[in-house]
Structure formats: structure tokens, C-alpha cells
């Protein structure tokens, strides 16, 4: 049915043909507009909910704002920006996301380079092992790491949460970067080696700049994953709470604290959205490299 | 080359020139230098835990290593009701989500292919991918609220059902005297009536705000020889009154559907006036009963319990498909744009219809991409966790349970049963092993 809707006459330039073409495509346009609206409504609903006072939300739906625009208020947000718990949670989230991203990019790029361009015995076995680790569910590591963190004082620390994320981000990072590095022009690297450049120099001066598109994709993925994480922080943190865990703590009183939950949720998704819009191209590239390869 | 963009360590300016062949040891050393940090992290945070968890799954509940229990933890997986619910739910997830996401992604990719503003559409559909599953859960929980005044989906349901089965004038009311009795959802006056008779239909238990607008003082109808007349009114006088009698300060109920029945069949139907009075005109001789039609008492649409025990999993599936459709669309669209155009054109010139081209050429050529999307979604769905925690209310968490969540609850949800928790984790791991093997095989084929 969908495919039939796109029957389009061969592009011709007479006005009649153009009108015909437009009419033939009208159903597709309408369907897409309806679907687009469907995809926007929930997020729009969250935002509008977040700017309505609690008294309003108890009795009427967020869409009534279109009838009474004056009910909108920033007071929920004002209250949140004076909420010490939320501000701390935001800071914690930022530390975790940025810290993890930096470490994964650095360690991942080093390993990706080694697996792509260094000749050493057993290289392919290491690579196969890393590909095997790609799909390991993180549930497999929760209990042993809980024990280990307890012994080494990493429990309830930002570093502990970051390192756990690093480990589970690395297989994908190495896989993505290795695949990208392998495709870099071989002669540039060879000539650098002949010129006597050390591997470290080649890595820093050639690989990192040339690999920037893949590194950017990876960095965005890592940032979003850790920013959006719940389970790792919930398991290894107690007072170290990123924003998802903080909101989770309010969830028990969903009905009565909706004026806190909705704006906090919206704040939590504004930063990933900004990152996504700023680096959309790299995001999609990384997605394709990671899945279609 | 751009300098200092992302530097892992300071550029080594005075590095000694590498010899042409560093030798076997030298190669090991360089490889190790670059790989060491990654291998250390992977060994400590992934390899060791996998081994530990597998061993731990054969030991008893408490502490870091309890007593040997063999497969007892695994048998609990299939005998404990909460774990069985989790496995059953996850089976539903696997059966529904990957297929739907792939189909929706394919549909969107094909639809957007020749539309100019496809970028805008794709961006909108892709947005949820950037948002946490947790925030999505909160977002949809707002959408799913049961009260149609608060939850958008039930509000939509209410306005649709309002067209097909509108709510009655009075949704709650009861007879004020024993001679008015329930009858097929409506009410009927037991006393038989003949032409010239008067029907008094007194109702109580109507909250003041439910009295229909425009209600006036109830009128006592005057009998007419060929008609059956009557009043339907709110038989409640502040400060007390006589039930079954129209008194001052008692309001008529306008807009009520009143029916005249003979042998159980409705012969005449009319609506009451502002003072509650009604009039069945020109009634042929015979015996009749007067009553209030069932439609008057039709309850307004109360909303479906999207977050209730029976619908919670379908609700979660919808929200999850909403998140991942954009992923499938983008990956499939990339596959679509890489497709050889001449093959499609050749099929079209050979007279294939657009549907045939889609079925016989596009889909088979896309099969590798579709399977990648499908498999990715199977993995994602097996590990689903956050959205359940965020979307399902406390009361239906158990009904919405999934394997990854069951693992977490068992190990960290207060009971701290590390034995069974490990067994659940291993079970989850075993489920993803086919994909793990597939990945390795695909890599080896490429290498």
C-alpha cells in the first residue's frame, strides 16, 4: 500500500505534469505529516506538562494549555534550579558522561590503531575476542564488580561508575575505530614509517587527525549512552546520583510530584538533544558504521 | 594536518627513529603499549566478571560465594512466578518489537525516499534515539494516564467514543421509590398505565453538578385523555420530603430519554422538558409501562488502563517502537540509497508494478540491512531495562517484569540473592550467544 502511493510519473517539466506529480504524491505528504506529528506529540506533551503548575495538572491535561495559554509558568523550573539535589545530580551526570567519553576515546583509539596498523602475533585473536565482547549484557558484570568495588573503595564513586561505562563502551569503540583506521590510505602511514616517525608520532600526528570523523561519532555515542544511563549508576552509586537516578527517586510519587518529575526529565533530555542536533551527521555516520558493517 | 585536536598524550618530538624491522620482541612491545590500557580494562571489567558470574550462578543465595547448589538457581528461573513472568514478557518483546521496528523503519524509509522535506521528517522520528529510555518512560507515562482529563491517549479515546456512544445525561441515578425498578440498563415504572394515566419517575442519588443544565422546578403533569403524561425529576428536597411526590424545590430533569413500552417493546420514545415533564401523545387503548431509556445512564468513557496489569506490556512495546523506529529508518534508508538504481529501473521498464518492484526487488536486495536491524533489535529488546522501571507504576511493575530487570531486582532489589541473580544474568548471556557467534563469523568472512 505504501509503495503504491509513490507511483510518480517520470519527471517532466510541463506545468500540468508537475501538478499531476504533486497530486500523486499528496497522500504520501499527508501520511508523513501525520506520522511526524505522532512522533512529536509525546515530547511536546512532556515539555508542556513541565511548564504547568501542579494545581492545573491534577485536573486537566497538558493540551488544554492551548485554550488557556496564561496558565503556563516557569515556576517549576525556577524551583528546580534552586534544588540542591538536582543541581548536584546534573553535575555528577556531566562528570560521568565527559569522563567516560574522554577515556573511551583515548583508550579505544590506541587499541584501534594497534589492531588496524601494527603487525604483531595474535592480533586477529584479540580482535575476535573484542568482537565477541560486543554483545555481552552488562548484567553479567554487575555482581562481581559490586563485590570488587566494595573491596577497593570504588563503590559510590564517580570514578567507579565511569570505569564500568568505559569497559562496556570499549568493544564498540575499538571495533568502530579499527574499522575506520583500516580504511585510511596505507601509503601515508608507510611513508611516515620510512621517514623514521615512531608509532606514537604516527598515532598522534596522522591517525588522530585523519580519524576525527569516526572519533567524533564515537564520542557522541559514548556521551549519550552515559548521560542516559540508569542501571549502572543505580547499582554502583548511592549518594553519587546522576540525573536519571535522581528522577527515579521521585518516581514513587508520580501523581503528586509531576511538577518536579516533568521539568527534571525535560532538563535531562535537553542536553542530549542539543548534542544530537549539533553533531547529527556524526551520530548517523557512527550508527551506520556500527550496524551495517 | 590539524594539530592538537584530540591528543592522547603530548606529541613526542624527540622520538628515536624506529629501525626498519623492530623484530618480534619490538612488535610485541609496541602492540602491547597501544593495547595494554584497553586489555586491562576489558580483562578486569568484562572477562573476569563473566567467568565469576558463571561460577557464582552455581552457588547459594547470600554473600559473595555461598554454598554449592548445582543447578538449583537455574531451576528457580522457570519455577518462580515473577521470573516466569519476566521470561514470558521478554518473549513477547522479542516476538513483537524487532519485526515491528523493522517494518516501520522500512515503511518510513520508502515513504521518505522521494519527498523533499524528508530530512525534517527523519530528524523528528530520529529524535527519541537521543533521549534516554528513562525519560521516554516518564514521557509516555504522562501520555498513558487513565483519566481522560489528564492522559492524552485516553482523551483521544474519549472524543472518539463520544461520537459513537455518547455519555448519558445522567450517569449515576437511582429510583426514589420501590415501584421504579431497573430494566435492561434503564428504569421502568412497575405500575401499569392506560391512556389518560400519569407516570411519576422520581430519581435520586444525582449529585447537584450532574443535574442537566437548564433544569427548572419540576411540574406535576395534568392527565390528558388520549395521552400518557408524566414527569422525570430529581426527587430530593433539601431538608426532607416525600419520596414519589413532586414537591416544591425539586428539579425536573430535562433531556432524559423516556420510553413507553408494551409487552417489553418500546412503542413510543420522547425527551423530557426543562421541568421534567413528558407527553406520549395519541396512545391507543391498552396497558403500558413507562420508563427511562438505558442511554440516559450510559457511563462516560472512563479511559483504558494503559498502565494497568493487562495492558502495561503492550503500552511499553508501543513506547519502545516509538524510540527505535528512527534507528531502523535511518539504517534502512542508507541501504536504500546505496541500492543499484538500474536494477529497479530495469524492473520498471519490464512492466513490473510499483508493488512488485518493492516486493520482488527492493526487499530482497535490502535483506542484509533488514536482518542487521532485526538482529540489533533482538539484542536491544533482550536487554531492555530502564523504560520498564520508568513507565510502569509501582503497582504493575511485577506484571511488566523483564529478564534484565528481574536480574537487577533479584540481586540488588533488597533481597540481594546473588546466586539467582547470577543465574538470570547467565541465562541472558546464553540468549545473546547466537548473535555473538554470528558477529564473529561475519568478521572472519570479511577478513
Image: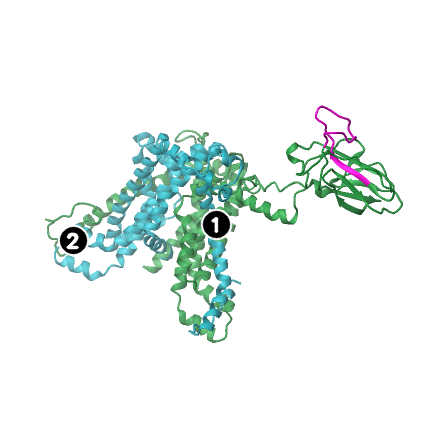
Identify which residue is drawn at 18% across, 59% down: A190
Tag 1, which chain?
B
Q: Residue A228: horizontal and vertical position, in percent? A: 38, 42
The label shown at residue B321 is 1
In the image, which residues are magenta? B229-250
Using residue B309 as the reference point, say whether residue A219 is left or right of it: left
Q: Is residue B294 visible?
A: yes
**Is B232 within the magenta?**
yes
Up the image or down, A75 lies above or below B9; here it is above
Using residue A271 as the reference point, say whether residue B180 is left or right of it: right
**Within 10 angstroms of label 2, few (less than 14), some, or many (20 or more) residues?**
few
Instruction: Report which colour depicts chain B.
Output: green
**Within 10 angstroms of label 1, few (less than 14), some, or many (20 or more) residues?**
many
The answer to which image quadrant residue A246 occupies is top left
**Separation (CA) of disc 2 from disc 1:** 54 Å
Up the image or down, B241 lies above or below A102; here it is above
The label shown at residue B68 is none
Marker count (numbered): 2
The residue carrying mark 2 is B23
Where the N terminus of chain B falls, by quadrant? bottom left
Q: Residue A84: horizontal and vertical position, in percent? A: 35, 30
Give whichever of B12, A111 is nearer the camera.
B12
Instruction: Report which colour depicts chain A.
Output: cyan
Q: Residue B442: horizontal and vertical position, in percent? A: 37, 57
Amino acid at each position: 500500500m505504501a509503495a503504491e502511493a509513490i507511483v510518480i510519473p517520470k519527471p517532466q517539466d510541463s506545468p500540468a505534469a508537475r501538478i499531476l506529480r504533486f497530486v500523486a504524491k499528496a497522500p504520501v505528504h499527508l501520511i508523513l505529516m501525520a506520522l511526524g506529528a505522532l512522533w512529536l506529540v509525546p515530547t511536546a506533551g512532556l515539555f508542556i506538562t513541565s511548564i504547568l503548575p501542579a494545581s492545573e495538572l491534577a485536573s486537566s491535561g497538558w493540551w488544554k494549555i492551548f485554550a488557556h495559554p496564561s496558565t503556563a509558568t516557569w515556576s517549576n523550573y525556577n524551583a528546580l534550579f534552586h534544588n540542591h539535589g538536582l543541581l548536584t545530580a546534573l553535575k555528577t551526570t556531566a562528570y560521568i558522561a565527559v569522563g567516560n567519553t574522554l577515556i573511551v576515546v583515548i583508550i579505544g583509539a590506541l587499541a584501534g590503531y594497534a589492531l588496524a596498523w601494527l603487525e604483531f602475533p595474535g592480533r586477529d585473536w584479540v580482535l575476535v575476542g573484542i568482537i565477541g565482547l560486543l554483545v555481552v549484557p552488562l548484567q553479567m558484570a554487575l555482581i562481581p564488580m559490586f563485590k570488587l568495588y566494595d573491596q577497593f573503595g570504588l563503590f559510590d564513586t564517580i570514578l567507579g561508575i565511569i570505569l564500568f561505562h568505559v569497559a562496556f563502551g570499549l568493544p564498540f569503540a575499538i571495533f568502530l575505530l579499527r574499522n575506520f583506521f583500516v580504511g585510511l590510505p596505507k601509503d601515508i602511514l608507510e611513508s611516515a614509517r620510512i621517514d623514521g616517525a615512531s608509532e606514537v608520532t604516527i598515532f598522534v600526528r596522522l591517525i588522530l587527525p585523519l580519524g576525527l570523523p569516526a572519533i567524533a561519532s564515537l564520542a557522541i555515542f559514548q556521551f549519550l549512552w552515559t548521560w542516559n544511563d540508569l542501571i549502572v549508576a543505580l547499582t554502583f552509586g548511592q549518594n553519587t546520583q546522576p540525573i536519571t537516578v535522581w528522577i527515579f527517586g521521585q518516581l514513587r510519587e508520580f501523581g503528586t510530584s509531576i511538577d518536579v518529575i516533568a521539568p527534571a526529565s525535560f532538563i535531562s533530555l535537553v542536553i542530549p538533544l542539543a548534542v544530537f542536533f549539533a553533531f547529527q551527521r556524526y551520530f548517523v555516520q557512527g550508527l551506520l558504521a556500527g550496524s551495517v558493517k | 594536518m590539524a594539530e592538537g585536536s584530540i591528543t592522547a598524550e603530548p606529541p613526542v618530538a624527540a622520538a628515536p627513529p624506529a629501525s626498519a624491522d623492530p623484530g618480534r620482541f619490538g612488535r610485541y612491545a609496541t602492540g602491547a603499549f597501544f593495547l595494554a590500557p584497553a586489555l586491562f580494562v576489558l580483562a578486569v571489567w568484562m572477562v573476569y566478571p563473566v567467568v565469576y558470574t558463571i561460577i557464582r550462578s552455581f552457588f547459594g543465595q547470600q554473600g559473595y560465594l555461598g554454598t554449592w547448589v548445582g543447578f538449583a538457581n537455574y531451576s528457580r528461573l522457570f519455577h518462580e512466578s515473577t521470573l516466569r513472568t519476566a521470561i514470558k514478557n521478554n518473549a513477547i518483546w522479542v516476538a513483537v518489537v524487532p519485526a515491528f521496528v523493522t517494518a516501520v523503519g522500512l515503511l518510513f524509509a520508502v515513504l521518505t525516499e522521494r519527498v523533499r522535506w524528508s530530512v525534517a521528517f527523519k530528524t523528528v522520528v530520529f529524535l527519541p534515539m537521543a533521549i534516554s529510555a528513562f525519560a521516554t518512560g516518564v514521557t509516555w507515562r504522562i501520555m498513558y494516564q487513565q483519566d481522560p482529563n489528564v492522559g492524552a491517549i485516553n482523551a483521544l479515546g474519549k472524543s472518539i467514543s463520544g461520537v459513537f456512544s455518547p455519555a448519558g445525561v445522567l450517569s449515576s441515578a437511582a429510583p426514589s421509590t420501590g415501584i421504579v425498578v431497573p430494566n435492561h440498563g434503564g428504569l421502568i415504572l412497575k405500575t401499569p398505565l392506560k391512556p389518560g394515566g400519569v407516570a411519576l419517575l422520581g430519581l435520586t442519588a444525582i449529585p447537584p453538578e450532574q443535574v442537566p443544565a437548564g433544569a427548572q422546578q419540576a411540574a406535576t403533569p395534568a392527565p390528558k385523555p388520549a395521552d400518557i403524561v408524566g414527569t422525570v425529576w430529581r426527587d430530593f428536597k433539601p431538608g426532607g420530603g416525600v419520596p414519589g411526590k413532586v414537591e416544591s424545590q425539586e428539579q425536573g430533569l430535562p433531556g432524559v430519554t423516556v420510553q413507553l413500552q408494551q409487552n417489553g417493546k418500546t412503542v413510543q420514545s420522547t425527551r423530557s422538558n426543562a421541568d421534567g415533564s413528558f407527553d406520549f401523545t395519541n396512545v391507543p387503548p391498552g396497558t403500558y409501562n413507562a420508563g427511562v431509556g438505558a442511554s440516559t445512564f450510559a457511563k462516560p468513557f472512563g479511559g483504558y488502563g494503559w498502565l494497568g496489569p493487562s495492558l502495561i506490556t503492550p503500552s511499553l512495546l508501543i513506547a519502545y517502537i516509538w524510540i527505535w523506529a528512527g534507528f531502523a529508518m535511518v539504517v534502512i534508508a542508507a541501504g536504500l540509497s546505496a541500492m543499484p538504481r538500474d536494477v529497479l529501473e530495469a524492473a520498471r521498464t519490464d512492466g513490473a508494478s510499483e508493488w512488485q518492484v518493492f516486493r520482488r526487488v527492493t526487499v530482497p536486495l535490502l535483506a542484509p540491512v533488514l536482518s542487521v536491524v532485526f538482529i540489533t533489535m533482538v539484542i536491544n529488546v533482550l536487554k531492555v531495562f530502564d523504560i520498564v522501571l520508568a513507565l510502569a507504576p509501582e503497582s504493575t511493575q511485577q506484571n511488566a517484569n523483564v529478564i534484565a530487570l528481574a536480574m537487577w531486582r533479584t540481586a540488588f532489589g533488597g533481597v540481594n540473592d546473588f546466586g539467582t541473580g547470577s543465574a538470570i544474568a547467565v541465562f541472558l548471556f546464553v540468549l545473546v550467544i547466537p548473535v555473538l557467534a554470528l558477529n564473529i563469523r561475519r568478521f572472519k568472512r570479511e577478513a
